[in-house]
Image (cartoon, rainbow, N blue to C red):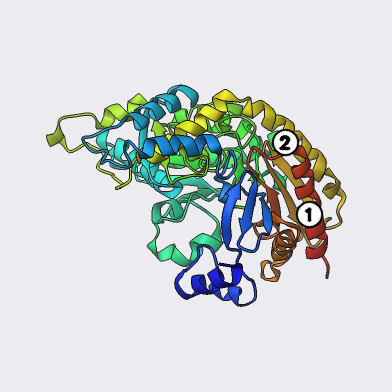
């Protein structure tokens, strides 16, 4: 088997995600044979440093020996069982541990298969809570501009990235979209905290007018990942929590991409000192091994569904593979690694190296912003540094960075004009410097006229 043979077979039968398949007439895909640590290896023996954690899921490296061993042990006992009317030890242990490490008050775990499904659960659960409380008028949701929460219809509706959403507009529920606290849009002399406070005025006004019909506000804490890795200050979350409490509206924290150490703390909400009403987790939950997501909520929500069967208040939402034992075991092993090693402390050191390595790009004539929250760092290219005029998206400048990265042995997958690093936590300081160098070279190539 070689790269060419597998690619030929793939193109005959596979439709790839987030891809214009016609691109593969001139942009060869990369078949991967095996992974180890931060490295992916193709069938021709080429290696690629996984700078994007394989779509932000891999925390402790590919084929991690500890997670591998845990899954093998579980495989001999139980591969899957229905979770309606049955239970198993991995899901109980995982739920106990998640309740212990997430923000205070989150006491109940409801499982699904992936991030989008978790968002769907949170939206439905919030709506259904108010319905069970006799509040039939509460049917709407508020989201932030430039937000992304997944691509199933409910999750897509509460997002605001046109590339993903606009085509399906006729199928989506109407939501209220409020200008977000994106620090990239700061005014001269303004810091990120001031941006957060200024931009919160729009949210406060929207809640004041529409709280009576609003179920929940949904946000990605600190980093809007799919929206170009745009970042904001924790102060916004503090103000939002206070306002949701005052106005009687739920707060949904979508930590699918930013949870499990990505922003410098185990969960992004910790940096604001808040507890949401619903927290959605996925991606790094299983260390990048198997699909699994969970929505955590508190007893007040749980109790609103707890009643006699004939009252028809139960939350009748299900997935066939809910809390799959193998996936739960991978998640437990992932949490073990957080407990066994000082992962957050080591990440802070790695994040400092990332900041130092990317700092020279601040002076690049076509870089408008270098930003970072913990182990997520992003570099935004522009046509004009002074006016921040962007490159037209049709020019696909980021594609040059992607191609250059593959030639140099690095998997970099820019989001339009934004190139970023979001690597596995087992990366070394030397490897971070290598990725920064490759990114700089790629940006130089991408910005040539």
The one of 254 and 54 positioned closer to us in this rendering: 54
Residue placed under numbered mark 1 in the picture: 438
Q: Is label 2 in a helix, a strand or a loop?
A: helix
Q: CA gap, disc 1 to disc 2?
A: 17 Å
- Residue 331 on image: x %, y %: 46, 35
Is 399 situated left or right of 180 in this image?
A: right
Q: Which quadrant holds residue 332?
A: top left
Q: As drawn, which residue projects farthest toward the left?
A: 310
Quarter of the image for residue 417 reads bottom right
The residue located at (78%, 41%) in the rendering is 430
From the top left corner, tell me how far across and down residue 138 is, in percent: 34, 42
Give me the residue at 63% from left, 70% from top: 28
Residue closer to the observer: 303 or 442: 442
Circle on res. 205:
none
The answer to whether residue 150 of the structure is visible from this angle is yes
Quarter of image, res 105: top left
Q: Is residue 173 above or below residue 430?
A: below
* CA neighbours of label 1 inside 10 A, class few (<14), some (14 to 19), many (20+): many
Label 2: which residue? 351
Sequence-earlier tag: 1 or 2? 2
Residue occupying image coordinates x 59% and y 38%: 60
**Spot occupied by residue 360 in the image (x, y as percentages of width and height):** 86, 46
Q: Residue furthest front?
A: 1
Figure quadrant of the C terminus: bottom right
Q: Are marks 1 and 2 in contact (CB under 8 Å)?
A: no
Residue 440: percent from left, percent from top: 81, 54
Q: Left or right: 52 with respect to 99?
A: right
């Amino acid at each position: 088997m070689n790269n060419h043979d597998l690619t030929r077979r793939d193109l005959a039968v596979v439709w790839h995600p987030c891809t214009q398949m016609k691109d593969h007439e001139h942009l060869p895909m990369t078949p991967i044979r095996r992974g180890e640590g931060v490295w992916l290896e193709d069938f021709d023996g080429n290696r690629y440093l996984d700078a994007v954690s394989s779509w932000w899921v891999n925390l402790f490296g590919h084929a991690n020996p500890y997670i591998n061993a845990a899954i093998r042990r579980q495989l001999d006992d139980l591969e899957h069982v229905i979770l309606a009317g049955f239970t198993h030890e991995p899901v109980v242990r995982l739920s106990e541990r998640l309740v212990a490490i997430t923000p205070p008050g989150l006491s109940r775990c409801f499982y699904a298969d992936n991030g989008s499904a978790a968002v769907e659960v949170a939206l439905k659960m919030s709506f259904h809570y108010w319905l069970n409380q006799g509040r039939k008028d509460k049917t709407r949701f508020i989201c932030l501009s430039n937000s992304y929460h997944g691509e199933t219809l409910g999750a897509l509706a509460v997002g605001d990235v046109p590339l993903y959403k606009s085509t399906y507009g006729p199928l989506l529920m109407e939501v209220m979209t409020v200008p977000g606290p994106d620090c990239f849009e700061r005014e001269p002399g303004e810091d990120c905290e001031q941006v957060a406070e200024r931009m919160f005025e729009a949210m406060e006004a929207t809640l004041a007018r529409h709280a009576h019909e609003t179920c929940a506000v949904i946000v990605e804490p600190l980093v809007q990942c799919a929206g170009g890795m745009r970042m904001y200050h924790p102060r916004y979350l503090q103000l939002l929590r206070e306002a949701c409490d005052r106005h009687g509206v739920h707060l949904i924290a979508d930590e699918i991409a930013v949870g499990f150490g990505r922003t410098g703390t185990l969960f992004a909400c910790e940096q604001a000192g808040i507890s949401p009403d619903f927290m959605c987790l996925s991606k790094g939950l299983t260390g990048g091994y198997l699909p699994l997501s969970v929505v955590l909520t508190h007893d007040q929500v749980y109790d609103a569904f707890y009643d006699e069967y004939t009252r028809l208040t139960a939350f009748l939402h299900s997935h066939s593979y809910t809390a799959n034992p193998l996936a739960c075991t991978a998640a437990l092993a992932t949490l073990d690694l957080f407990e066994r090693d000082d992962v957050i402390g080591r990440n802070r050191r790695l994040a400092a190296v990332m900041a130092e390595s990317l700092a020279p790009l601040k002076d690049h004539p076509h870089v408008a912003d270098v930003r970072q929250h913990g182990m997520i760092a992003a570099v935004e290219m522009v046509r004009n540094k002074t006016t921040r005029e962007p490159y037209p998206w049709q020019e696909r400048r980021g594609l040059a960075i992607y191609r250059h990265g593959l030639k140099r042995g690095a998997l970099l997958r820019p989001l339009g004009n934004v190139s970023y690093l979001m690597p596995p936590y087992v990366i070394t300081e030397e490897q971070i410097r290598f990725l920064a160098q490759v990114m700089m070279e790629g940006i130089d190539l991408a910005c040539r006229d």
